[in-house]
Amino acid sequence: MNHPLQDRLTSFFYSRDDVLRSRSVSGRLLAGHLDVPAPPARLLADWDREIRTRLLLEPGDVEQMPLSRTRARWPEFGLCVQAMRDWTRASGLGDVLAGSDMALMACRGARYHHDGSQYGGAAFCNLFLSDDKGLDVHFPGTGHRIPLTRGVAIVFDTCQPHAVIPRHQNGYDDADFADERDLSQLFLTWELPIEDPAVAQALGIVFDVDTATASRVDEEQVWSGDRRVGVDPGVGQWRSAD
């Protein structure tokens, strides 16, 4: 099944009052490059040890890292958070970041996927902390492709397919991440509530686009046209989830 990637996409998500609601899927992306400090060598070594000994990060994995240790070992950590607050405010998102939970994540590449089955009620807001390792974040449905360098900031709809792939590749392949090179990317992430008026306006979200279907589905999901869809992990195309 090959729908055009942006053809009549609908997210069914749990609203703030815990009822399934429908909305459009945004093709907009907010992106910037912020001046953030380099992590100290001691912290880079700590991250590497955590990834190798506890996370055991495999190609394509995206896992959560301990945030408290990073805060304790990085005196300038607060400058990263403040830079994101300033940037999101300047991007029209108000002070939503201050009220959103923050996590530290690590990935070793990422297969094409959407997060609308778990985070349909949110937009992701990410700040990348690692230096350039020749990787891009790619959004096949919108055509955005952003080189990952320290200070890259993005806000995007969780339902939009995305992946982290080598800069000169057009798809995801485990083999590209299978050797011993350090291809991990560390980033801070926030879940911004999609129902926040500033977030919805910035991304152009339209709500209650299919109330009939929302009343009969029983979990978060993404539909294209009249059926539930998933994402091909290698190339990012939508395909039937049935």
Image (cartoon, grey):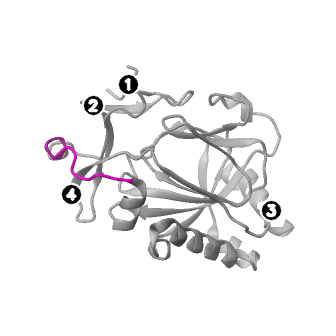
Q: Helix or strand or loop: what does disc 4 sit on?
A: loop
Classify the position of the N terminus by image quarter. Answer: top left
Q: Helix or strand or loop: what does disc 3 sit on?
A: helix
- Depicted 233 relative to depicted 192: above or below: above
Confirm whether residue 196 shows in the render.
Answer: no
Mark 4: which amino acid? Val
Q: Mark 3 points at which residue?
A: 44
Q: Earlier in the sequence, mark 4 or mark 1?
A: 1
| Image disc number at residue 19 | 4
| CA neighbours of label 4 inside 10 A, class few (<14), some (14 to 19), many (20+) | some
Disc 2 and disc 1 in contact, CB within 8 angstroms? yes
Would residue 27 be counted in the magenta stretch? no
Q: Name the residue under label 1.
A: 3
| CA neighbours of label 1 inside 10 A, class few (<14), some (14 to 19), many (20+) | some
Please indicate whether residue 39 sits to the left or right of residue 110 in the image. Answer: right
Mark 3: which amino acid? Leu
Q: Name the residue under label 2.
A: 225
Q: Give the range drawn in magenta.
A: 204-213
Residue 148 on image: x %, y %: 70, 49
Q: Helix or strand or loop: what does disc 1 sit on?
A: loop
Please indicate whether residue 189 sits to the left or right of residue 132 in the image. Answer: left
Q: Helix or strand or loop: what does disc 2 sit on?
A: loop
- Distance between mark 3 and mark 1 Cα atoms: 42 Å
* Residue, far top: 1
Residue 33 on image: x %, y %: 68, 59
